[in-house]
Image (cartoon, rainbow, N blue to C red):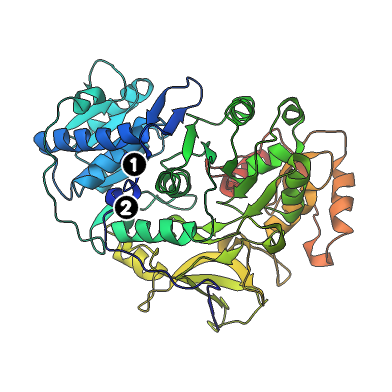
Amino acid sequence: MIFRSTYPDIDIPDVSLPAFVLAGATALGSKPALIDGPTGRTLTYADLATSVRQVAANLARRGFRKGDVFAIYSPNVLEYAVALHAVATLGGIATTANPLSTPRELALQLNDAQAKYLVTIPELLDHALEAARQTSVKEIFVFGEAAGASPFADLLQGSHAVPAVAIDPRTDLVALPYSSGTTGLPKGVMLTHRNLVANILQTSAVIQAPEGERSIAVLPFYHIYGFTVLLNISLFQGVTIVTMPRFDLELFLKLLQDYGITRANVVPPIVLALAKHPLVARYDLHALQSINSGAAPLDASVEQACGDRLKCFVAQGYGLTETSPVVSTTPVDPARRRGGSAGLLIPNTECKVMDPASGAELGPGELGEVWIRGPQVMTGYLKQPEATAAMLDEDGWLRTGDIGSVDIDGYLHVVDRLKELIKYKGYQVAPAELEGLLLTHPAVADAAVIPCPDVVLKGAVTPDELMAFVNQQVAPYKKVRQLDVVTQIPKSPSGKILRRVLVEQERTRTGS
């Protein structure tokens, strides 16, 4: 059966992303739009709107045209929003690159996207220059100053007119993020202005910003979660965003305290730290009202432990790069929270759960592959028609590759990735379930389950004791039969466990 959002549909205007997001910026005037957390440097809403126009005008004078691709290879800085919306104003396409990318990885993305311009920070300029030499990039800009690149500040000079550009929000691309690449090479995800405007409106219909909302941008803007939820939804709602260049727990806690952060959009490893790390007790986090976790499943016990410790609302959402990203989320209402669920489908969104073996549609509570349809679904993968066809069917349904279910109340429950399910004697075992159980043990700091499971300890306990702790709580076919203690669980920047890295490490260790 098809599950539809319990919220009424909303109208999606045919408008460009910057015109939509920044529509109220001038009226907000001197209200801080973005604050650099470590330094306190501030960009007001009025200055943001002016800067976007200045940069757009100067980029056009340098030859930037509609359809050109502009790469942003940078951690979270105030000018990230300026570059993004200036490019979008001209009908250009922003491809956002992971600042941890090596020159080889960056060059692959630049060539695939056919980027003509790039902006970075001084610390990453050497990598950017090395990568650009292998591509058709015409000019490199730098936030700040560094030899070998044009200062981004040069684009903020003068008062030239912004050329009029005809943008079709339904067909013109505005963003080209790359999928995480946890399996295979990353793929360029083609997102239109309408995709992103729709997702901002859909999510804002469920999660509103109260007066005085301050959020923290701890997740990177290059990732679709940071790009849409932390940056563009916040700007659309008139929120003050406090940015961090990279995650550091102590700095994160200090910024939460010092800036009176009211809302934090994070990933499961950060929720786990907030629930268990002793450092948290040193900071006054009373202003924090709500935490939303996404990008990977979060066990209900960790969700509850974090909420109890911080005395704030903690819940989850779900999405993919290919869905701009939000599919479901939980309204900030304790009566409507369902521990461990990914919340309710946002407006204009449909879902069906498919049996991977038979292809049959499943009913409420039945577990299968989650398929999604809605205006936030991508147009496809760049230059990859076969991969697009494998992901999107003729009726617009996107095969997520995630295993989950929808209950009778409309709440989406995501269990794990289809390809990460462990087969044991004909049974399917979801690693996330066993990881959640391990994390409830007071001696476990982190855990990952692969065909040979690994955990990170924070107290004294033996592997045999931990296996017994889990095995007495699960069916026989789910029992943990081998356990290794490691110092750290490898994860992507979005918080996903890199199981393939653990598998490779295990093979190296055993010589298999």
Image location (x, y in percent) of residue 188: 34, 52
Disc 1: CA contacts within 10 A as few (<14), some (14-19) or many (>=20): few
Q: Nearer the viewer, residue 366 or 243?
A: 243
Residue placed at 36% from the left, 48% from the top? 177
Query: Is residue 37 placed above or below 299 in the rendered structure?
Result: above
Q: Is residue 134 above or below residue 189?
A: above
Residue 204 x %, y %: 48, 56
Residue 422 at least partly seen: yes
Quarter where residue 269 is shown: top right
Where residue 46 sits, quadrant-wise, is top left
Task: Please report the residue visible at 36 percent of the width from the left and 53 percent of the height from the top.
Answer: 187
Q: Which residue in the protein does label 2 denote?
A: 20
Q: Residue under circle 1? A: 27
The one of 15 and 376 positioned closer to us in this rendering? 15
Residue 502: image location, x then y, percent: 62, 44
Callout 2 amino acid:
Phe
Quadrant location of the N terminus in the rendered image: bottom right
Image vertical order of residue 335 relative to residue 155, above or below: below
Q: Is residue 320 above or below residue 347?
A: above
Tell me the crowding category of disc 2: few under 14, some 14 to 19, or many 20 or more residues within 10 angstroms, Cα based: some
Labels 2, 1: front one: 1
Mark 1: which amino acid?
Answer: Ala
**In the rendered view, does 247 fall on the left or right side of 441?**
left
Q: Secondary structure at mark 2?
A: helix
Determine the residue positioned at 66% across, 62% down: 341
Instruction: From the viewer's perspective, tell me whether residue 496 is left or right of residue 227.
Output: right
Q: Pointers 2 and 1 in contact (CB under 8 A)? A: no
